[in-house]
Image (cartoon, rainbow, N blue to C red):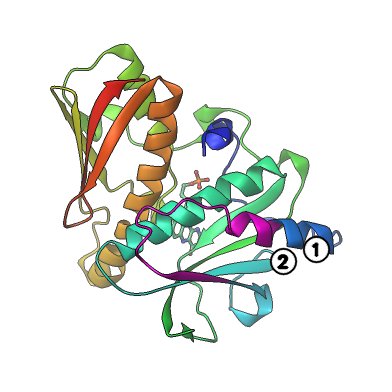
Amino acid sequence: MDQFYEMIYKRKSVRRYDGKRPLSAVELAEITAQLEKLQPLDSDIPVRFRIVKRGETGCLWGEYCLLLYSEERENYLANAGYLLEQMDLWFASRDIGACWYGMGRADEKKLDGLSFVIMMAFGRCRADAFRKSMSEAKRKPLSAVYTGGAESALERALQTAHYAPSACNSQPWSVVCEEGKLTVSQQSGFKNPLMKNLVGYMNKIDMGIFFCFLELALHHEGYDFRRTLLSDGAAEYTLSEE
Ligand SMILES: Cc1cc2nc3c(=O)[nH]c(=O)nc-3n(C[C@H](O)[C@H](O)[C@H](O)COP(=O)(O)O)c2cc1C
């Protein structure tokens, strides 16, 4: 997964696509092949992917949508976030635009007995559609989500992880660092109580996305770790030097 690290600084949600330059059959075959290589957060959770034309989803942009189906069991939403975020980074590495699309509705709610979870729109975009500077990325200050003193390498890793995308940019993660251990938990990311159900759902996906970024960043800064998934979308990382 480490080859994705640099893509953290390139990716962003792409909402403008070049309809005149469709993806080729070779590119679509590469995408399908890449799906086989994704690392799950929990390998016991069965998942399937489906690629459909955007028109079949009600999604507003992109040429295609990548749909994820999963068995609904503990941590399945975080697992979905963790898996599809690897595709988001891979798409950026191939200059293919992508955007998570939580509002999208799948025509088929079930696939091989698994439930539709979330989709990601993708397609050809302009080369300059990607992020040029991290100052464009709107994120809360790190101090709003992180407590505990840390050596500078760890703080760099957390700053990088904090660039993770999230639904409505809610950034629902909070990280506490104590004695070589990071506890990552989920805060309420949205203020609107009317959206409570949708929010809880999306924020669990967001946590998986954050775990993906955090792990890439920890490895990059030379940390090894043992991850323990906890209930309520939380995880504990016990750190050691690589
Ligand atoms: C789970 C999830 C669902 C999202 N759903 C939508 C969506 O329905 N429509 C949309 O325009 N953006 C959606 N986004 C994109 C976020 O708004 C975006 O990631 C966030 O604002 C941060 O911006 P960035 O991705 O450019 O860094 C979603 C992101 C995530 C992680």
Q: Residues within 10 Å of mark 1 (few under 14, many from 20)?
A: few
- The mark found on residue 19 in the picture is 1
Magenta stretch in the rendered image:
31-49
Specify the amino acid type for callout 2: Glu
Q: Residues within 10 Å of mark 2 (few under 14, many from 20)?
A: many
Residue 207 x, y percent position in the rendering: 32, 50
Residue 205 x, y percent position in the rendering: 36, 58
Specify the amino acid type for callout 1: Gly
Q: Is residue 25 left or right of residue 196?
A: right
Disc 1 versus disc 2: nearer the observer: 2
Between 227 and 145, the one lying in front of the other is: 227
Query: Residue reaching furthest top?
Result: 152
Does residue 57 sit above or below 188 in this rendering?
A: below
Residue 239 appears anywhere in the view: yes
Q: Is residue 43 left or right of residue 197?
A: right
Q: Quadrant of residue 144?
A: top left
- x 45%, y 24%: residue: 220
Q: Is the residue under label 2 in contact with that under label 1 (CB below 8 Å)?
A: yes
Which circle's residue, 1 or 2, is located before the other in the chain? 1
Q: Is residue 46 magenta?
A: yes
Residue 108 x, y percent position in the rendering: 52, 86
Q: Is mark 2 within 8 Å of ligand 1?
A: no
Quadrant (top left, top right, bottom left, bottom right) of the C terminus: top left
Residue 217 x, y percent position in the rendering: 42, 29
- The mark found on residue 63 in the picture is 2
- x 59%, y 78%: residue: 57
- x 16%, y 23%: residue: 148
Between 205 and 198, the one lying in front of the other is: 205
Residue 22 appears anywhere in the view: no
**Which element carries disc 2, helix, strand or loop?**
loop
